[in-house]
Image (cartoon, rainbow, N blue to C red):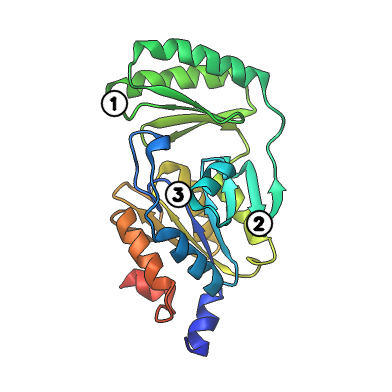
Amino acid sequence: MDARASKETKQHALFLDFDGTLADIAPTPDAVRVEPGLPHTLDALRARLGGALAIVSGRRIESLDAFFAPLLFDAAGLHGLEIRANGRMLERPASDHGALRAAATSLRKRLVAWPGAFVEDKQHTLAVHWRLAPQAGPALADVMEEIVATLGAGWRLQAGKAVAEILPAWADKGAAVETLLNAPAYRGRTPVFFGDDMTDEDAIRIVNARGGLSVNVGLRPSAAAFRLPDPAAARALLARWAQDDASDFAAELRG
């Protein structure tokens, strides 16, 4: 790798969504699998970036760690309620919320009417998935709107692909990216973000405002400046970037 490539690479900070971006979407969150070479690719790319690589996800950090063990990456989990950089937690979620537990119990009872739909209780957020019951989507979105209204102004509803999630109103991936950009390994760098879902648009907005490179993975409408067709294409591009011959991120995306 020549000096010019090293300099250009280390001007960037890379932020990567997980489900639908690094990993293919599966019928349920537990069924997702990581391609065997992906941890090595990310580890090599992290080294090229001087440590400025983080996974930004709606999953909990402990869930992300399980996919990449024994490697540990910087990460923002639960849409930024949890943030870890250089092995140190920068953000931790508040204590468990009794109202959210009650909402989870209520949701499980109501979901009996829609076989295939299920509740994912992440302790600090609450998601309902209907990928296996697509006909239930509109009704379940209404149910979630109703529940978040009863929880009050401190909560909001985040829509995604066949999922709706209740989370604290202040939490979003854009705020998570901004927090990480203030961490030592990321400070002063140009952000690059890959995401595939509506949950990623907050991060895309922040990256665009900072003159960074935003990439939508998939075919949905997005404010991202660049597009890749699917997670396989994203993984292939990241693998090229992890090699010495990939020096100019913007040129690669435009190409």
Tell me, for residue 232, which label it has, or none: none
Q: Which of marks 1 and 2 is in front?
A: 2
Front-most of 87 and 231? 87
Q: Is mark 2 on a helix, strand or loop?
A: strand
Q: Can residue 12 be seen in this view?
A: no
How much space separates mark 1 and mark 2, taking CA atoms? Answer: 37 Å
Image location (x, y in percent) of residue 148:
54, 22
Q: Which of marks 3 and 1 is in front?
A: 3
Q: What residue type is labelled 2?
A: Ala
How much space separates mark 2 and mark 3, taking CA atoms? Answer: 17 Å
Front-most of 89 and 14? 89
How much space separates mark 3 and mark 1, taking CA atoms? Answer: 22 Å
Among numbered discs 1 and 2, the one appearing first in the sequence: 2
Residue 155: quarter of image? top right
Which residue does the image show at 40% across and 51% down from the upper left? 34
Identify whether 66 is placed above or below 98.
Answer: below
Q: Is residue 141 toward the left or the right of residue 210 in the image?
A: left
Q: What element carries label 1?
A: helix
Image location (x, y in percent) of residue 22:
40, 53
Q: Which amino acid does label 3 sit on?
A: Phe
Tell me, for residue 85, which label it has, or none: 2
Among numbered discs 3 and 1, the one appearing first in the sequence: 3
Q: What residue type is labelled 1?
A: Pro
Identify whether 46 is placed above or below 27.
Answer: below
Q: Can residue 92 be seen in this view?
A: yes
Q: Name the residue under label 1.
A: 134
The tally of labels here is 3
Image location (x, y in percent) of residue 104:
54, 18
Q: Mark 3 points at which residue?
A: 18
Which residue does the image show at 44% across and 34% down from the upper left? 159
Among numbered discs 2 and 3, the one appearing first in the sequence: 3
